């Protein structure tokens, strides 16, 4: 059984700033998601093709899940939850690609996502409740 390296692997060091493989993988994933979102949004049609149908299915599934939890506030929190869900799915599946690893295997990436979600719950709570 192959053992995984749980330690961060520095790629570039620019003084006190260290660019690790987790940072590079995360930026590649964000660029791919952004590019795919841009490409799909340029070709939206009334009569959807197979790609548009798949994307609409994903979006409606996320929307249904958010609506089940917070029916009154789904329009406000749906973009955040949807973006987070899509990023996490792609990030976890990136570990299946040879030469790449899942950014969520690094504790710092997981902690950063946890902090973002923690602060976002307060942000949305204050915004919605006043």
Image: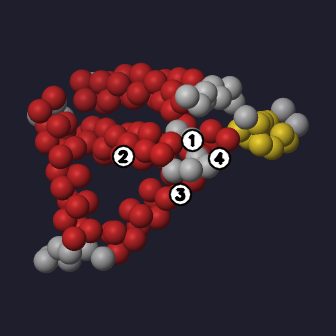
**Residue 34: x and y, percent?**
46, 59
Q: Which residue is mark 1?
A: 101
Q: Closer to the camera: disc 1 or disc 3?
A: 1
The image quarter in which residue 52 lies: bottom left
Q: Of marks 4 and 2, which one's residue comes earlier in the chain?
A: 4
Q: Residues within 10 Å of mark 1 (few under 14, many from 20)?
A: many
- Mark 2 to mark 3 CA distance (whole Å): 13 Å
Query: Which quadrant is home to the N terminus?
Result: top right
**Residue 88: x and y, percent?**
41, 39
Q: Which residue is mark 2?
A: 86
Question: SS for tag 4?
Answer: helix
Q: Closer to the camera: disc 1 or disc 4?
A: 1
> Closer to the camera, 128 or 31?
31
Question: SS for tag 1?
Answer: loop
Question: SS for tag 2?
Answer: helix
- Mark 4 to mark 2 CA distance (whole Å): 18 Å
Q: Which residue is mark 4?
A: 24
- Mark 1 to mark 4 CA distance (whole Å): 10 Å
Q: Of marks 1 and 4, which one's residue comes earlier in the chain?
A: 4
Q: Residue at x 43, y 44 (%)?
A: 93
**Residue 55: x and y, percent?**
25, 60
Q: Are marks 3 and 4 in contact (CB under 8 Å)?
A: no
Q: Which residue is mark 3?
A: 31
* Residue 44 position (above or below residue 29): below
Q: Residues within 10 Å of mark 3 (few under 14, many from 20)?
A: few
Question: SS for tag 3?
Answer: helix
């Amino acid at each position: 059984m192959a053992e995984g390296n749980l330690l961060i692997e520095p790629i570039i060091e620019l003084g006190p700033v260290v660019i690790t493989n987790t940072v590079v993988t995360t930026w590649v994933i964000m660029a791919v998601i952004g590019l795919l979102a841009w490409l799909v949004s340029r070709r939206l049609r009334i009569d959807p093709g197979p790609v548009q149908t798949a994307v609409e299915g994903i979006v409606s599934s996320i929307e249904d899940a958010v609506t089940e939890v917070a029916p009154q506030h789904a329009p406000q929190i749906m973009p955040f939850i949807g973006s987070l869900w899509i990023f996490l799915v792609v990030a976890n599946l990136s570990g299946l690609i040879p030469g790449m690893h899942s950014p969520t295997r690094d504790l710092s990436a997981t902690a950063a996502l946890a902090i973002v979600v923690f602060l976002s719950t307060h942000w949305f709570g204050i915004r919605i409740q006043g």
